[in-house]
Image (cartoon, rainbow, N blue to C red):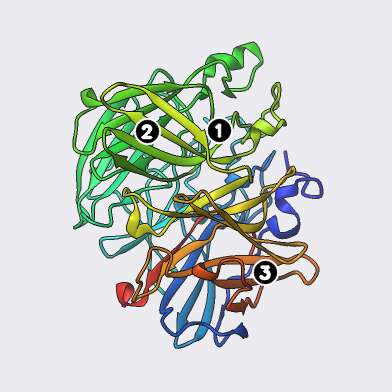
């Protein structure tokens, strides 16, 4: 069984993989790179090395890193596959040997039923740069070479999966994470890694059923889990239904746990059914926990057709929940009427009250395209738009604080943008305080950079 690449939109245009790993120095720059920008912007994303088996989903591709190192106003580009166990086995075989999310698990695959692609996000913690994927352990990456060092299991203490969105507390230096299981209780594990890189806590949290839990949030003293009804029920297969299904009649649950508490300390809050892939931030305000995330009424993320699956309810918008720890009450409200995804903040404010948030501006349609960026002022309610040129699309923008920052939004936003007409990719640098203005620097890439997922900025002094 093979994929018909001519008709799979995630293998066409700028979703299509690139096959060549290159390095190029002294890249052409339109405008000027600020000399204070010293470090490396790296973005992760799916890039299948071989024609997929069966139906291909965007989430399936092998992880590839695209990195741009900035120093003294100059730029160097390199891209590298992440050398996972699965990547190396398929490279040896000269073909794909794992199918993807849209195919039944390969229970007879001698290497295991699934492949850790390491293709989703990136985090710097305790002197290590990690590529992360929610179905397995992280992979350590060397900077600036982007070479794969190997997997990280925290000296054998990691016995669960590891989220694609760990949170590094900017004050304590702790890295908090979770891992979910689809097949067996307790379905969720919660962990804490010390500032020195030691896994010091891993506790089970009971859920009623396995769910796809992509992200979570932290505050100064609490951790928030998102138990949304995108469920995994093997018994549905016997009835000819999808094994994954969004259960629109099932409430959504938010679990709030003291950061260093035990599983018995968790409190659950229920709200109307919804789904969220990504959180912007959370913080404490008096008796309340405030959570801000991109919220949808439902999701058909795995291409599962169901009633209303292609309605406007499948579109994410920025949203706020307030959970009162004294009364148990929930308040919720929309924070904007523009479709958005891939929310980011100045991460020095992670878990604390922040004023500004940034996100990709979704171009409504069948494909996950972003025709601009959004800047939210959560204090005034104002939303600014940075629009890309016509037929140009980007992705997640990473905020880089100015080394001498005097305010929360004093810094830059970096993201890759693709020009469909010229088939050219570039890394753009925006002044976050002059958000609607043209990019102050456009760094021309030596080859096409496919659309991807999440990026990170690592300052030069961190990896020197």
| Residue located beneath label 2 in the image | 225
Tell me if I can see residue 215 in this picture: no
* Residue 84 or residue 39, whichever sits in front: 39
The extreme top residue here reads: 239
The answer to whether marks 3 and 1 mark residues whose Cβ atoms lie closer than 8 Å is: no
Residue 7 x %, y %: 80, 46
| Residue located beneath label 1 in the image | 106
User: What count of labels does the image hold?
Assistant: 3
Residue 193 x %, y %: 23, 48
Q: Earlier in the sequence, mark 1 or mark 2?
A: 1
Residue 378 x %, y %: 46, 49
Tell me if I can see residue 105 in this picture: yes
Disc 3: CA contacts within 10 A as few (<14), some (14-19) or many (>=20): some
Secondary structure category for the residue under label 3: loop
Q: Earlier in the sequence, mark 2 or mark 3?
A: 2
- In three-dimensional space, the C-alpha distance between marks 2 and 3, rounded to whole angstroms, equals 37 Å
Specify whether 28 is left or right of 71. right
Residue 412 x %, y %: 48, 70
Secondary structure category for the residue under label 2: strand
- In three-dimensional space, the C-alpha distance between marks 3 and 1, rounded to whole angstroms, equals 33 Å
Quadrant where the C terminus lies? Answer: bottom left
Q: Earlier in the sequence, mark 3 or mark 1?
A: 1
Q: Residue at position x 30%, y 38% from top?
A: 223
């Amino acid at each position: 069984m093979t994929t018909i690449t001519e008709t799979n939109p995630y293998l066409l245009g700028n979703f299509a993989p690139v096959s060549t790993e290159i390095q190029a120095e002294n890249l052409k720059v339109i405008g000027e790179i600020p000399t204070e920008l010293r470090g490396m912007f790296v973005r992760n994303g799916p890039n299948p090395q071989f024609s997929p088996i069966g139906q291909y989903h965007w989430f399936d591709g092998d992880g590839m890193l695209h990195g741009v190192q900035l120093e003294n106003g100059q730029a160097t580009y390199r891209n590298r596959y992440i050398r996972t166990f699965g990547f190396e086995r398929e490279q040896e075989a000269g073909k794909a040997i794992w199918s993807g999310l849209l195919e039944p698990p390969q229970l007879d695959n001698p290497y295991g039923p699934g492949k850790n692609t390491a293709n989703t996000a990136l985090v710097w913690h305790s002197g290590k740069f990690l590529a992360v994927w929610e179905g397995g352990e992280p992979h350590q990456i060397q900077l600036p070479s982007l070479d794969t060092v190997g997997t990280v299991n925290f000296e054998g203490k990691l016995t669960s999966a590891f989220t694609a969105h760990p949170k590094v507390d900017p004050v304590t230096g702790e890295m908090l994470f979770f891992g979910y299981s689809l097949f067996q209780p307790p379905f969720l594990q919660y962990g804490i890694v010390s500032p020195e890189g030691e896994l010091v806590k891993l506790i089970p949290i009971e859920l009623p059923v396995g769910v796809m839990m992509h992200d979570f949030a932290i505050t100064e003293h609490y951790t928030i889990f998102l138990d949304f009804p995108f469920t995994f029920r093997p018994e549905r297969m016997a009835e000819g239904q999808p094994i994954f299904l969004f259960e629109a009649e099932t409430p959504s649950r938010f679990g709030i746990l003291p950061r260093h508490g035990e599983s018995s300390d968790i409190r659950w809050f229920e709200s109307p059914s919804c789904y969220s892939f990504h959180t912007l931030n959370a913080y404490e305000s008096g008796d309340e926990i405030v959570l801000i995330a991109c919220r949808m009424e439902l999701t058909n993320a795995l291409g599962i057709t169901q009633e209303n699956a292609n309605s406007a309810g499948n579109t994410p918008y920025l949203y706020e929940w307030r959970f009162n720890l004294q009364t148990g009450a929930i308040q919720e409200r929309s924070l904007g009427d523009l479709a958005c995804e891939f929310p980011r903040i100045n991460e020095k404010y992670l878990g604390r009250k922040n004023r500004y948030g940034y996100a990709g501006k979704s171009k409504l349609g069948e494909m996950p395209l972003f025709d601009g960026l959004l800047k939210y002022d959560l204090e005034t309610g104002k939303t600014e738009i940075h629009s890309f040129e016509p037929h140009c699309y980007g992705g997640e923008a990473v905020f880089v604080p100015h080394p001498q920052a005097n305010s929360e939004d004093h810094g830059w936003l970096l993201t890759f943008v693709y020009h469909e007409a010229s088939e050219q990719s570039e890394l753009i640098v925006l002044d976050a305080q002059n958000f609607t203005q043209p990019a102050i620097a456009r760094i021309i890439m030596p080859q096409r950079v496919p659309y991807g997922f999440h990026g990170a900025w690592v300052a030069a002094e961190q990896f020197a």
